Image (spheres, helix red, strand yellow):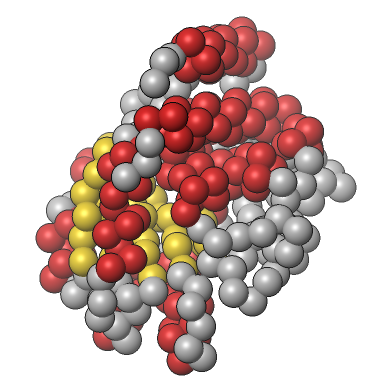
Amino acid sequence: MMTPSRVLELKKQANDIRIGIIEGVYNAACGHPGGSLSIADIVTYLYFEHMNVDPAHPKMDERDRFVLSKGHTAPALYAALAHRGFFPVEELKTLRKFSSRLQGHPDMKNIPGVDMSTGSLGLGISAACGMALVGKLDGKPYRVYTVLGDGESEEGQVWEAAMFAAHYKLDNLCAVLDFNGLQIDGKITDVMNPTPHDEKFRAFGWHVITIDAHDFDAIDAAFREAQTVKGKPTLILAKSVKGKGVSYMENNCDWHGKAPKGDEYTVAMNDLRAIGAALEKEEV
């Protein structure tokens, strides 16, 4: 279990990553802030506490692999990579601009630390399955992590990948399902209800853990438990808040795929700076 001081450090880092997300989409005047904000705590934990990665050697063979299956939430991944030291934080402001390497979706050819180019929903978890299988066949110690959206789980390819992972007993694979309940057109249960995810993944042969996606102690316990599971892949069903940290974006599907402008940007930054200031005053 992490110490209270370490949890506080991760909360501060996650807030910095949320600020990076808003800076990116605001300067791009487009992008996907809602689902990026909802996974900020998960990617913070993975890159700053859990995964074996090295910004100085982004392609080292023994590194853990990360695949952002919901590739449209690249602003969250970019902010995590930048703050982890893979490239300058200032570069986040170049998101989606001509000549920038920070495209609207992750690009493994040009961005240090990106293990897989993603964007077409369903493909990311499939690629993660392939990476995990290769790791097992080659006897490599690395683990593979992938984050997918709850709306993305409406794709049939996700369930083909789930069947594949269980069939090949990919216990070096851990998938996180960002369960914020919303997609671009509204509630996932209204658009094309894919629930209950926990029962379905268990039926496909997965070990399933359900957590609060914004509780670092729960996040830590879940990923540690996943490391102990043998003979089957693990799904962490992370119940999250779309737009987490920005008052008017929280639980609002309108902010799935648009950028804040003018006063909206100011309010968002003030919200996050207020959270940061409160964390600075927090005692452990």
Res 78 visible: no
Q: Quadrant of the N terminus?
A: top left
User: Residue at left 78%, top 33%?
Assistant: 90
User: Residue at left 46%, top 68%?
Assistant: 144
Image coordinates for residue 109, horizontal then vertical, percent: 74, 66
Image coordinates for residue 229, horizontal then vertical, percent: 25, 70
User: Between 126 and 215, which is closer to the camera in this rendering?
Assistant: 215
User: Residue at left 59%, top 74%?
Assistant: 62
Relative to 164, residue 159 above or below:
above
Seen from this angle, which residue lies furthest right?
A: 99
Seen from this angle, which residue lies furthest bottom?
A: 137
Image coordinates for residue 71, horizontal then vertical, percent: 54, 53
User: Between 23 and 226, which is closer to the camera in this rendering?
Assistant: 226
User: Between 138 and 36, which is closer to the camera in this rendering?
Assistant: 138
Q: Quadrant of the C terminus?
A: top left
Relative to 27, residue 168 above or below:
below
